[in-house]
Image: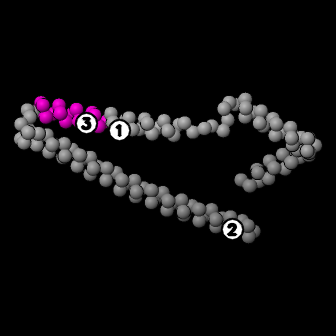
């Protein structure tokens, strides 16, 4: 009876923690969304200001200023993509524990062979049954 009450209390506490976590995540998502909108507005304002500065201060034509800004933005986008591609290559080249599925199966087969040498097959079946039974009762 006490175990049932404690498990119920624990599940209620986990539910409350989960609700707090979801609420906190929603607030953070809203704040990040607002910040992203303000940042986009700032970038647009800066681009318009740069366009007018190129026309009035440096004597560009309207088409020349627009083309120059488009070129700068395209160059910036290509540089960002290159940096992302280079950083992705570094993370993908981590060494793998297994080089092939056959090697993994061979390791399992060797481990099972060693276990069968140390313990009889009937004992292994009984241990596996008990482990499965205990695992199913925990849920």
| First in residue order: circle 3 vs circle 1 | 3
For image coordinates 39% across by 38% down, the residue present is 83
Q: CA distance from mark 3 to mark 1?
A: 11 Å
Furthest residue in direction bottom, as rendered: 2
Counting residues from the start of the chain, the first of labels 2 and 3 encountered is 2
Crowd around label 1: few <14 · some 14–19 · many ≥20 (10 Å): few
Check disc 1 and report the residue beneath it. 80
Q: Image quarter for residue 54?
A: top left
How far is disc 2 from disc 1 in space, using C-alphas? Answer: 53 Å
Q: Are marks 2 and 1 in contact (CB under 8 Å)?
A: no
Residue 139: percent from left, percent from top: 71, 53
51 on left or right of 43: left
Residue occupied by mark 3: 73
- 9 to 114, vertically: above or below: below
Q: Which label sits on residue 6?
A: 2
Q: Of callouts 2 and 1, which one flags the residue occurring earlier in the amino acid sequence?
A: 2
Query: Label 3: how many residues lie within 10 Å, few (<14), some (14-19) or many (20+)?
Result: few
Q: Check residue 81 for magenta coloring.
A: no
Task: Let me know if residue 72 is in the magenta part.
Answer: yes
Asked if residue 126 lies left or right of residue 95, the reply is: right
Q: Secondary structure at mark 3?
A: helix
């Amino acid at each position: 009876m006490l175990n049932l009450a404690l498990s119920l209390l624990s599940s209620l506490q986990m539910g409350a923690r989960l609700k707090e976590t979801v609420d906190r995540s929603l607030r953070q998502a809203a704040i990040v969304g607002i910040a992203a909108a303000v940042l986009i507005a700032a970038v647009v304002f800066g681009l318009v200001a740069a366009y007018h500065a190129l026309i009035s201060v440096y004597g560009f034509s309207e088409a020349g200023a627009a083309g120059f800004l488009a070129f700068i933005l395209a160059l910036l986008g290509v540089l960002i993509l290159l940096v992302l591609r280079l950083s992705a290559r570094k993370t993908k080249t981590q060494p793998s524990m297994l080089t092939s599925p056959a090697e993994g199966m061979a390791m399992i087969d060797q481990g099972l062979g060693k276990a069968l040498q140390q313990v009889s097959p009937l004992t292994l079946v009984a241990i596996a049954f008990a482990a499965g039974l205990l695992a199913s009762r925990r849920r």
